[in-house]
Image (spheres, helix red, strand yellow):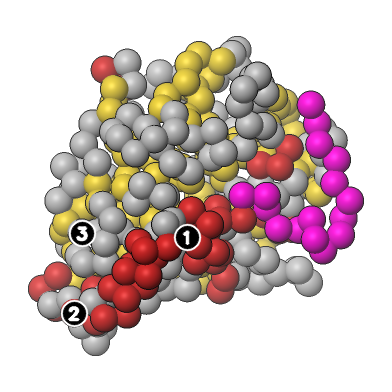
Amino acid sequence: MRRHYSRTSDNKAPRHFYGWPGASLLGMVCRVKPFVLVVGLCLLFIASPTLALDPKDLRLATPVKIFEGGDELGLRHPSDVLVTPDKRVLVLDGVSNRVVIYDQDGKFLGTFGLGGNGEAELDMPLGMAQDAKGRIYIADTRNSRIQIYDNKGAYQSQIELPHNEGMKEPDPVDVAVDNERGLLYVVDNENHRIETYGLAQKNHIGTIGGMGHNRGQFRWPFSITLDDQGIAYVVDVVNTVVRTIRPEEKWGFGNDIGGWGVEKGELFRPKGVAVDAKGQVYVADSYLGIIQVFDQAGNFQAALGDEQNKIRRFMTPTRLYVDGEGLLYVVEMFANRVSVFKVGS
């Protein structure tokens, strides 16, 4: 069933408002018991890792470039980024219901996408991914579907997500592509699960997870990425971990990364994840405004630092992306920009 929205200011905020990282405090109030919230806020201000990290726990992140602005709209709360094989940088600008295209030097090249609920139209999209053929998959969040475009931004097709009885309306917030296995992963935030589809036929294959605290379950998952082996890394926001899913074990769950807290190796409000060619896992904590680095077993390696040997602070870091040259792209949602860094070893 397709929803229709009037274009009033009241309808501009996504219905899962806590899913937007800048609103993570509101989400925390809505989702976390008051006692835990009070303790967490106290710990945040008296024991934050942003105040206490030793320089040996930092890894230098050197700014390389920034993507922002473009036309008269600029970027308005961007939520995702990717780099195409021909080196164009695509930024998902969800509030404006479009994708903004830049060249590698930050020059504005154009946009595609339009607000609405018709064919090729978007309503508060939150995540995107690209397959080996260059097709772009966009999680069209408030339209409860996945829209598919070619590598130039021309609409091709869509996947309507089924609204099953007893479940909330599908709430796709991110996607990831496994080219080797021909799979599309869709993060369904409101239903606390991951749906899988075949790339060729767009057929539904299976469901991973469900609501809960334990390994194999989620509470409001938000982001997903894959490493070179096809292992999926899912940011499980309210459980404050990154879940790992192994496709060779019929989507069996592996080790978790992180856990609730504000010390090194712990997560307070994770939102974004990326894995580089060396298997290093980057996790963005939108509330603390930091990015930590883990190995694939979940061991803390470092937090990103600056030239003064201090922890580098970001404004609501959301999605992360590592390009073919190893550069780290950080979507800073409420700064309305994508910042790019060279990360030291």
Residue depicted at x 47% and y 31%: 193
Instruction: Between residue 287 and residue 71, name the one nearer to us.
Output: 287
The image position of residue 216, as x and y in percent, is 33, 29
Amino acid type assigned to the residue bearing label 1 in the image: Met
Left or right of 109 in this view: 296: left
For disc 3, the marked residue is 265
In the rendered image, residue 188, in percent from the top left (x then y), is placed at 54, 35
| Residue 328 percent across, percent down from the top left | 37, 59
Q: Which residue is mark 1?
A: 28
| Gap in angstroms between the C-alphas marked 1 and 3 | 20 Å
Badge 2: how crowded within 10 Å, few (<14), some, or many (20+)?
few
Residue type at numbered disc 3? Gly
Q: Which residue is mark 2?
A: 52
Q: Nearer the viewer, mark 1 or mark 3?
A: 1
Residue 170 left/right relative to 177: right
Image quadrant in which you'd find residue 20: bottom right
